[in-house]
Image (tube, grey):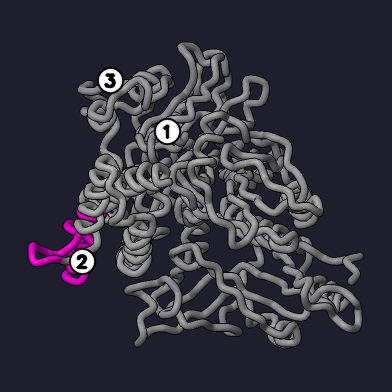
């Protein structure tokens, strides 16, 4: 197999029609085209359209008449229904196109792997464009126009810039991708992992064997695709691998992270992330390793985040880039008025952003104290003076700034995970930022006033942020506040998907402030329907059966012949828990049955409450059974 001269990326705007077709003619190993649309859950479509069709019907791919799909089979609930299911796919010429190669299928003529040209697209329904990519594209266009209009009318406090010199507003966006790798069919030693993490044995350690090879190849391949990788490294999770008699690693279980360069176009940033995930999966698979992007694949140890970086700048008519979050005097101010407004908007509206960020049980399992994952709606800016940076890892959104590089100023939002729909959350971050910028610039607040407002104490009245909340902490919120104080100051974190989704109806004014033509309320509602459906189905048909299997397995080491009074007492506790969780009796239904009954009746409040109870009792059962089983000899 030869990989010499392969085309990995067709950069946006580099070729016109004739150039693209000429390039493809020179590379007959590229045999297929796939239009990549993104539904509201973040799933990407993939087809195998013969390249000849692309040659014959080129224009049709760009006016949404070449290819269509069944919208009722992807996540577009309440919109692409069975009686209105047709969705047309419109190719996007404004972003990079990637070529996906199949090393298992070699072209007999060229000796090269067969390639599929993946062209990102929009999904067009009878009711309009309904996909995640179109939402983000329309949002950044809308927010850009609004911000430019505000700057021209009010100027920016903290930045000396002539609004008439601005050609356009741009949005710098990036994601970091954490993931776990393991040898297939491997049992997870949770307690070994937990101890290793607490002993800080893994973070940025040297990688070995297959993991090292796959990580190096991943970084190399990201570079081939033009994603400009910054680094790949070990993360905090993992245990030392085992080696068989031949010197081969046979017990791999490690957490890694890969980062690549930001993009000035959020749509391109989100497209890059999908391509990065494909590359990571394929490279590690080629090395015999399994990758999971789950937010919390292993209970009790570090989950995988996807910290999302949000920035905003202006391209001047002379071509110069100006970071709109950075003040002229980095020693005097943390942020410009645009920067303050942006973070205030995101924090104020986070209750109705969170359902889109954490839409699965897995994602909420990650957001727990003790694992460097945020549960509080709070930011950190830095020390008492702006020249002291923050690295507070317990906050939702931290200010990233480099005193020597004002272009780098941005916010790192720490709650997203690898299964968050990056298109939608970036759209919501920028819509929320716009609302705060409207306040900061419209009220012509100076940077001192805005700093005071975001640093407000609970009970202080301000013009924009809520009176009974606090929004800034420069200390570890888990170490310095108890649970009651956390809820009082920063709000109650949702424990289930249902609790999270309820915010969309409990905060109608916040939802209304974000909903607009770019991201209409009907698409927000469609997302909610899909997320609720997936939560209910997963709870009934995956989580409960998995828990039932654990309840049944808990009897494996018990024997009635054991007369040790202590063990009899321990087993009695275990068996009572098993019965309460999974066995219906004449006294009533088990917790599992009650959850299923509540879901059948669409009583989601009760199902959610029972799920919380179930989780606590499963944790208790696990701890009791571990203690019991390790005393059985």
- Residues tagged 3 and 2 counted as in contact (Cβ below 8 A): no
Relative to 325, 98 lies left or right? right
Question: Disc 3 vs disc 1: which is toward the camera?
Answer: 1
Q: Earlier in the sequence, mark 3 or mark 2?
A: 3
- Residues tagged 2 and 1 counted as in contact (Cβ below 8 A): no
Judged from this view, the residue extending furthest toward the left is 587
Please tell me whether mark 2 sits on a helix, a strand or a loop: helix
Q: Which residue is mark 1?
A: 370
Relative to 494, 282 lies left or right? right
Q: From where the camera sits, is residue 512 visible?
A: no
Q: Which residue is mark 3?
A: 457
Judged from this view, the residue extending furthest toward the top is 384
Q: Residue visible at 65% across and 41% down?
A: 240
Measured from the top left, where is residue 146 in percent x and y? 45, 46
Report the front residue among 94 and 53. 53
Q: Quadrant of residue 182?
A: bottom right
- Label of residue 593 in the image: 2
How many discs appear?
Answer: 3
Residue 581 on the magenta segment: no
Q: From where the camera sits, is residue 326 visible?
A: yes
Q: Residue visible at 73% across and 37% down?
A: 206
Q: Earlier in the sequence, mark 2 or mark 1?
A: 1
Neighbour tally class for label 1: few under 14, some 14-19, many 20 plus, Cα within 10 Å: few
Q: Earlier in the sequence, mark 3 or mark 1?
A: 1
Q: Which quadrant, please, contains the N terminus? A: bottom right
Q: What segment is highlighted magenta in the picture?
A: 585-611
Report the front residue among 301 and 356. 301
């Amino acid at each position: 197999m030869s990989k010499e001269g392969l085309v990995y990326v067709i950069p946006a705007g580099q070729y016109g029609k004739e150039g693209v077709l000429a390039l493809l003619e020179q590379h007959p190993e590229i045999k297929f085209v796939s239009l990549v649309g993104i539904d509201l859950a973040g799933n990407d479509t993939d087809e195998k359209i013969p390249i000849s069709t692309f040659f014959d019907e080129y224009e049709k791919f760009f006016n949404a008449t070449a290819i269509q799909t069944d919208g009722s089979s992807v996540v577009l609930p309440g919109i692409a229904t069975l009686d209105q299911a047709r969705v047309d796919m419109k190719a996007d010429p404004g972003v990079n196109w990637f070529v996906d190669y199949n090393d298992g299928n070699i072209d007999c003529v060229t000796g090269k792997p067969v390639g599929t040209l993946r062209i990102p697209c929009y999904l067009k329904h009878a009711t309009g464009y309904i996909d995640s990519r179109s939402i983000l594209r329309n949002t950044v266009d809308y927010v850009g126009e609004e911000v430019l209009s505000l700057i021209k009318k009010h100027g920016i406090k903290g930045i000396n810039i002539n609004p008439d010199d601005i050609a356009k507003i741009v949005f710098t966006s990036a994601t970091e991708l954490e993931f776990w790798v393991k040898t297939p069919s491997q049992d997870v030693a949770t307690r070994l992992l937990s101890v290793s993490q607490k002993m800080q044995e893994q973070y940025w350690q040297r990688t070995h064997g297959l993991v090292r090879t796959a990580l190096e190849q991943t970084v190399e391949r990201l570079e081939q695709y033009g994603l400009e990788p910054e680094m790949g490294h070990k993360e905090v999770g993992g245990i030392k691998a085992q080696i068989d008699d031949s010197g081969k690693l046979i017990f791999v279980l490690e957490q890694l992270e890969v980062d690549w360069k930001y993009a000035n176009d959020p749509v391109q940033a989100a497209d890059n992330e999908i391509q990065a995930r494909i590359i990571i999966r394929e490279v590690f698979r080629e090395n015999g390793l399994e990758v999971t992007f789950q937010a919390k694949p292993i209970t009790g140890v570090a989950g995988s985040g996807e910290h999302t970086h949000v920035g905003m700048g202006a391209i001047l008519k002379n071509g110069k880039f100006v970071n709109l979050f950075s003040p002229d005097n980095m020693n005097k101010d943390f942020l410009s008025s645009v920067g303050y407004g942006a973070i205030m908007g995101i924090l104020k509206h986070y209750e109705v952003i969170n359902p889109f960020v954490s839409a699965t049980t897995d994602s909420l399992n990650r957001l727990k104290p003790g694992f460097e994952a945020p549960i509080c709606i709070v930011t950190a800016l830095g020390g008492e003076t702006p020249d002291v940076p923050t690295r507070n890892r317990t906050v939702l959104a931290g200010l990233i700034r480099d005193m020597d590089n004002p272009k780098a100023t941005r916010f790192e939002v720490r709650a997203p995970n690898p299964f968050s729909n990056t298109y939608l959350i970036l759209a919501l971050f920028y819509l929320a930022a716009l609302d705060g910028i409207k306040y900061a610039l419209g009220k012509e607040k100076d940077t001192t006033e805005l700093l005071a407002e975001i640093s407000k104490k609970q009970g202080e009245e301000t013009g924009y942020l809520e009176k009974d909340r606090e929004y800034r902490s420069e200390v570890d919120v888990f170490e310095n506040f108890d649970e009651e104080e956390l809820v009082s100051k920063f709000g109650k974190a949702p424990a289930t998907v249902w609790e999270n989704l309820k915010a969309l109806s409990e905060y109608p004014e916040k939802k209304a402030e974000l909903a607009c033509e770019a991201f209409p309320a009907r698409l927000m509602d469609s997302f909610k329907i899909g997320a609720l459906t997936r939560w209910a189905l997963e709870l009934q048909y995956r989580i409960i059966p998995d828990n039932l299997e654990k309840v049944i397995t808990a009897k494996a080491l018990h024997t009635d012949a054991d007369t040790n009074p202590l063990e009899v007492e321990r087993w009695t506790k275990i068996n009572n828990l098993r019965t309460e969780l999974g066995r219906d009796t004449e006294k009533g239904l088990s917790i599992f049955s009650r959850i299923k009954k509540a879901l059948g009746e669409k009583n989601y409040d009760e199902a959610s409450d029972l799920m919380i109870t179930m989780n606590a009792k499963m944790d208790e059962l696990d701890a009791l059974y571990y203690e019991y089983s390790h005393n059985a000899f």
